[in-house]
Structures are given as structure tokens and as C-alpha cells.
Image (tube, helix red, strand yellow):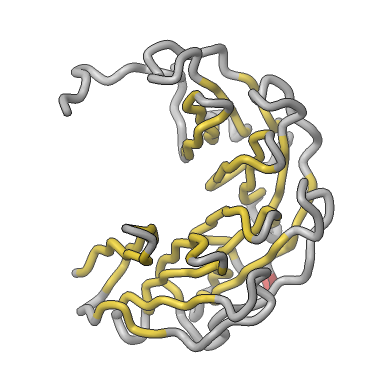
């Protein structure tokens, strides 16, 4: 298919990060504004030729809303993001819209705090056995550890404990999907340079199987996990 030239401007602002989902049949975006807020806008048509007015989903004051991700949670759009401020610990935040189109949003709530002064990297969001869940990595100077956390209810009003699917992995990038009802993560392994894959041992992600090497690489640095004919598939970039 042909692509429009020039592309359509949806938000007239300098954006740092953006994610997209289909919300009530129309495409929608969450993004970090130039002021560091969490913005949201939904198209006025299913094709995205016309767009509505952007709204501020979260104004977190002096904090920045970094690396937003979005999915549909119990019928309403919901987002996760990294709340960041210089010399303070990163906090994973969660916020859900008050209606199915995202015209108004509830109050954001913390999910977890990155341990030991680390940063939250490679944030992913999915619905895992009926509840929202996040995969991410806690990055420090000498390591970058994988983490997974799932909500304790279907709307994300409370959250369970964090687990590390591969505790000894140095993660350079990761991507999460649900494969045959179980959460799964593809990741770039910094030490081996390979693209690896790990799948949970339970539908809730409370336990995880040993990882396998999906593709041997020189230095894989970017991965994306999806499903092709119901089988897991990984696209990756290698140096």
C-alpha cells in the first residue's frame, strides 16, 4: 500500500516518546509532551485521517513521564510510564482512563520503585490472564536485570509482587507478548550477544521456564516479539 506524503501531523508539539493502541475502534496515542506530561489523543475516525483534541492524562509536576506504553484494560485505555526526576529513584506508574475513549483519566498510582538507584528501561505492557502486566529492566552501571509484575485485579487498582524471569541475564532490550495463554519475553542478551526467549511456567507469570536462544548473534541490541500463525516470532537488530 502507498503511504501519505507528507504524513499527517497529529500533535503539534515536540514529543519524546510515543505508543499507539486501538481504542474503541480508532487509533490513539500516548506520549511524553515537551513539558514532561503524559498526553493522549484519539482519532476521530477508524482510519486515523482526522484526530480529536489532545488531553493531558497526567500532569506530574516537576516529574517527567518517560517511556509511556498503552493497552486496553477492562474496556478503557490504560498506560504505564516511568516517573523520572534527577537524583531520585525511577518509579513505574500506572493510570487508567475513566471512560472507554480516554477523554478523562483517573489518578496515577505507583506500581513499584526501581531498586538501588537503577533506572527503568524497555517498558512493555500486556494483558496477562485478564490483568494488566509490565515487563521491564532495572538498569544500573554494570547490569540491567529483567523484571515482571502483574496486577492483583482486572483494573490495575492493586499490584502483585515483582519477579525476575531470568535473574542472571544482562538485558539490552526486551519485548513482551502472550504466547499460547502464557506471558513470554524476547530479549537481547548483552553477555552472549544473542536474541533469547523465555516463557512463563504459569498463565499469571509467577514462575518462568529456562530461557532458550532464538537466534545467535554478534551483538543483538534490539528485539520485538510477536506472533505469526500463532507461533512466537522475533524480529531483531544485530551489529
Q: Quadrant of residue 128?
A: bottom right
Q: Residue at x 79, y 47 (%)?
A: 109
Residue at far left of view: 2
**Quadrant containing the N terminus in the rendered view:** top left
Q: Residue at x 33, y 83 (%)?
A: 213
93 or 133: nearer the viewer: 133
Above or below residue 164? Residue 38 is: above
Above or below residue 179? Residue 108 is: above
Q: Residue at x 70, y 62 (%)?
A: 150
Question: In the image, is 12 to the left or to the right of 213?
Answer: right
Q: Position of residue 187 (x, y in %)?
A: 41, 71
Q: Position of residue 189 (x, y in %)?
A: 38, 78
Q: Position of residue 78 (x, y in %)?
A: 66, 40
Residue at far right of view: 158
Question: In the image, is 227 to the left or to the right of 106?
Answer: left
**Quadrant containing the C terminus in the rendered view:** bottom left
Q: Quadrant of residue 186?
A: bottom left
Q: Residue at x 64, y 35 (%)?
A: 77
Q: Position of residue 181 (x, y in %)?
A: 56, 65
Question: In the image, is 83 to the left or to the right of 191?
Answer: right
Task: Tell me if I can see residue 117 in this picture.
Answer: no
Above or below residue 197? Residue 114 is: above
104 or 113: nearer the viewer: 104
132 or 66: nearer the viewer: 132
Task: Tell me if I can see residue 30 in this picture.
Answer: yes
Callout count: 0
Amino acid at each position: 500500500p502507498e503511504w501519505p506524503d507528507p504524513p499527517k501531523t497529529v500533535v503539534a508539539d515536540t514529543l519524546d516518546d510515543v505508543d499507539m493502541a486501538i481504542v474503541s475502534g480508532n487509533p490513539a496515542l500516548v506520549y511524553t509532551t515537551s513539558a514532561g506530561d503524559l498526553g493522549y489523543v484519539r482519532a476521530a475516525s477508524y482510519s486515523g485521517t482526522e484526530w480529536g483534541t489532545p488531553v493531558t492524562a497526567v500532569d506530574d509536576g516537576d516529574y517527567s513521564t518517560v517511556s509511556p506504553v498503552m493497552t486496553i484494560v477492562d474496556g478503557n485505555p490504560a498506560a504505564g510510564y516511568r516517573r523520572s526526576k534527577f537524583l531520585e529513584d525511577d518509579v513505574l506508574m500506572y493510570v487508567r482512563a475513566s471512560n472507554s475513549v480516554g477523554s478523562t483519566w483517573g489518578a496515577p498510582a505507583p506500581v513499584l520503585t526501581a531498586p538501588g538507584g537503577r533506572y527503568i528501561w524497555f517498558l512493555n505492557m500486556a494483558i496477562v490472564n485478564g490483568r494488566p502486566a509490565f515487563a521491564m529492566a532495572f538498569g544500573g552501571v554494570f547490569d540491567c536485570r529483567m523484571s515482571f509484575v502483574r496486577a492483583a485485579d482486572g483494573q490495575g487498582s492493586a499490584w502483585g509482587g515483582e519477579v525476575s524471569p531470568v535473574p542472571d541475564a544482562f538485558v539490552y532490550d526486551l519485548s513482551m507478548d502472550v504466547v499460547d495463554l502464557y506471558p513470554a519475553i524476547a530479549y537481547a542478551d548483552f553477555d552472549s550477544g544473542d536474541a533469547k526467549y523465555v516463557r512463563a511456567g504459569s498463565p499469571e507469570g509467577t514462575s518462568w521456564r529456562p530461557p532458550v536462544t532464538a537466534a545467535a548473534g554478534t551483538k543483538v541490541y534490539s528485539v520485538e516479539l510477536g506472533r505469526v500463525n500463532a507461533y512466537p516470532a522475533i524480529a531483531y537488530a544485530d551489529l
